[in-house]
Amino acid sequence: MFPLLVALALSAPRLKILFTEASNPNLVDGIALSRLELYDGAGAPVAVDAIENPRGVYLESEAPENLLDGTTATKWLDTNFTFDDGGTLPRQSELLLTLGAGAPWPASLELYTTKCCSKRDPIGWRVYAETVCGGWQLLDERVDVASPEGRATNYTAVGAGFALPAPTEVDPAACELSRAFRFVFTAVRGRTEDGTPVIADGLQLAEAKLCAAAARLASVEQQQQQSVRGVDAGRARSSRSVHDQAVLRGHDRGRGRRRRRRVPRQVRRWRPALAKLARAAGRGATARAPAVGRGAARGPDARDL
């Protein structure tokens, strides 16, 4: 078992509550609660050692620790819940709860509204349990829950709460055998001149690859070898191309020389016959050609030329 799995197996169990909806999404300026309780199967409170609000934006007087002080006089308010870029990105606010050592697994969850501003009441959420593999197992999901009209009051009857099923046991040995991966992207690059994070209109990637360490090294070496082979092949093609061009140029020059030698010979062979014809024309010889026959005079033919 890897050290990470050992640490997870020995650490206190954790719950994650992901709030996804508020009572009035058109007017909401955050999400808020005054109190949070976990109960076991007998209705007794379950101790919570620590609570966090990852990526939350809140005042020190409105921190998530106020949810565990046992009173509705204080509150937790996360104003980062409003950052949805005009509705294109889902609103989310997350609470991480670390249970006390030896505490029983909670069988229900109870929430309490704040003293004002019902528009901030959560009406949709999901509850997860952390597994020994470090992942999160969905236990319960609520959508369009009717928040109470009363202020600083609980959502359900006292001690009842929203039921939470026990998580399914996960064998630590199976953590290494999983073929499923989940990527949770939590931020994008970009800040304004004063350092404020930019509210992006989306998140994008061109490609994602999963490689084992040995496979990654082999892939890198293979790519380098392919690059070397490509360079060598390019040099060989270039060398052959230069050689072929030189051969063709030499061949063309040879053909040119042969043509230049052949044309003067043809002119020289025809020159006597042409001179005879020119002299005959100058003496006023008739243009009528003599009959060709045995012993008859004949004009120049291929044997004369």
Image: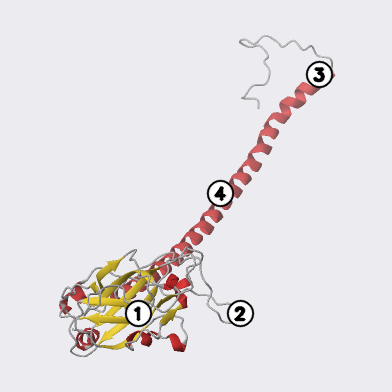
Query: Which of the two labelled residues, at mark 2 and mark 1, occupies the earlier sequence position?
Result: 1
Report, in whole angstroms, how far the alpha carbon at label 4 lies from the one at label 1: 83 Å
Quadrant into which the N terminus falls:
bottom left
Please name whichever residue, 206 or 202, is drawn nearer the observer in this view of the structure: 202
Query: Which of the two labelled residues, at mark 4 and mark 2, occupies the earlier sequence position?
Result: 2
Reading the image, the residue beneath label 3 is 281
Reading the image, the residue beneath label 1 is 95
Q: Looking at the rendered structure, which numbered label has been put on residue 251?
A: 4
Please, what secondary structure does the residue beneath circle 3 have? helix
- Image vertical order of residue 68 relative to residue 231, above or below: below
Residue 111: x and y in percent read 31, 77
Residue 216: x and y in percent read 33, 74
Q: Looking at the rendered structure, which numbered label has been put on residue 64?
A: none
Q: Looking at the rendered structure, which numbered label has been put on residue 193?
A: 2
Within 10 Å of disc 3 (Cα), the crowding (few <14, some 14-19, many 20+) is few
- Image vertical order of residue 107 relative to residue 253, above or below: below
In the visual, does 235 lie left or right of 134? right
